Each structure stands twice: as structure tokens, then as C-alpha cells.
Image (cartoon, rainbow, N blue to C red):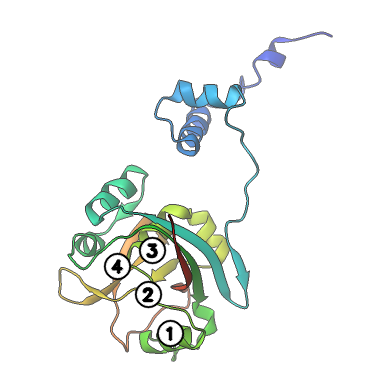
Amino acid sequence: MKNTTNDFFVISDVLPGKLNALVKNIMKQTGVDDPNEAVRLVNSGEWTLTGSVQRWTEKDGIIYFSVTSDGTIGEQWITRLESKGFRVSDYAKSILRSKSFKPTSGVTSEIAVLKGELFSDNERITKNIRKDAKNRKFTTPNAEVACLIREKFTDKELEAMGLYWIVAMHEPIKDSGGDPTLLNASRLGDGSWLDARYAYPGSEWDRARGFAFVVSQVSGS
């Protein structure tokens, strides 16, 4: 069987920038900081690249998935998210640094996200959204759920859900301006954000937002 140079060097026409991005993605998926070790893991078969799998389900305008807490405190979340390329707004940082931000560890929460399209524009206000969730027997999430959601999903996945924001409907925490505020994961033109927005009972919300509640929780051993 005849081999040619191109048989061995299949990357000859691949731009260096694309190769760099590929290796960075492999490093991110494997959790390895050394690029050579990350590539070795794939080449040796110790780490297998698989096709993408949708990590949520949707039924009747409600998106379902699960997240698991790991005890990360607010200040650590700021460092953790920013190290992965996410942007954390000043208001979000003030919430994460608040004494009212109380993380859990080893708690798996099944999350239900009510899409904004479930509500008419004049009815999409905080108190109505909470009332609808209560009628469905959904409960209030911990504020850390917003961080877990931001870390779990890429902007492309949020786009596939049809959302620009997922708001964690936790108990409001006062931000640096003194307003009762909710954390949310957002995809905007200037980056991937963990952001915050004030949430009074009569606050109006955009149709492109989703509202995250808890279906059930299981504590780990």
C-alpha cells in the first residue's frame, strides 16, 4: 500500500490558529493543563472524543436538566468562571460575595426552566412566574444554581434552547446598590456572562429569558 506525505501529515492544510483552538478544547475537556499531555491522552485512547449529546430535554416549553453542587463559595466562583473565559458582572460579584450566598455540597438538583414564551408579555412578571412554578410544585433553587448553569452550558447550547438568559429564581439577594437581585447566566454580543438583575415582585422580564426552579433534590453521601 502506497503512502504519501499527505497520508502522514493530514494537518498540512489546517491553519495554526485552528490547531491551537483544537488543542485548547481538548485541554478543557480532559481537564489537563499541559497541551502535550492532553494530546497524548487522546492519541493513547485513554480519553475518547465522542459526538455531542444534548444535555437537556424540553417538554411543553419547559427545559429539564440536572446540576450538582460542590461547595464552591462565592469568591471561588468568580475565579473559577473567569478562568474558563466567562465574564462576571460587578453586580453578580457583589451577590457572590454576600453573606446571603450560601453554597451546598453534593446536592444534585433536577432543574426546570420555564421559558418566557409560556407567559404573555404583560403577565411575565416575577410574582406571576413564581406563582406558576408553585402551581407546578417546583421549588426555589439555591443561588449557586446560576453558577452551575453558567458553567454547564455553552452559549451555543443556550441558543439551541432558544434563550438569551437563564435566571435562577433563588431568594433575592441584595446587590451593592441595595436592590433585591437574581443571578442569571446570559449570552450577549460581548461575551458569556454570569450577570444579575433586580427582581421586585412586579419586575417585568423579556420573552427570551428562562426561569430556573427545582423539581427535586438529592443529597449525595
Q: Residue at left 51%, top 76%?
A: 115
Residue at label 2? Answer: 169
Q: Residue furthest left?
A: 177
Dot 2 falls on a residue whose secondary structure is: loop
- Calculate the distance from the C-alpha at mark 3 to the C-alpha at mark 2: 9 Å
Residue at label 1? Answer: 129
Side of 193 relative to 110 (left or right): left
Is 12 situated above or below 192?
above
- Calculate the distance from the C-alpha at mark 1 to the C-alpha at mark 2: 9 Å
Q: Nearer the viewer, mark 2 or mark 4?
A: 2
Give the crowd class for mark 1: few <14, some 14-19, many >=20 residues within 10 Å.
Answer: many
The earlier-in-sequence mark between 1 and 3 is: 1
Q: Nearer the viewer, mark 1 or mark 3?
A: 3
Residue 89, quarter of the rendered image: bottom left
Q: Position of residue 30 (x, y in %)?
A: 49, 35
Residue at label 3? Answer: 145
Identity, as a three-letter code, of the amino acid under mark 1: Ile
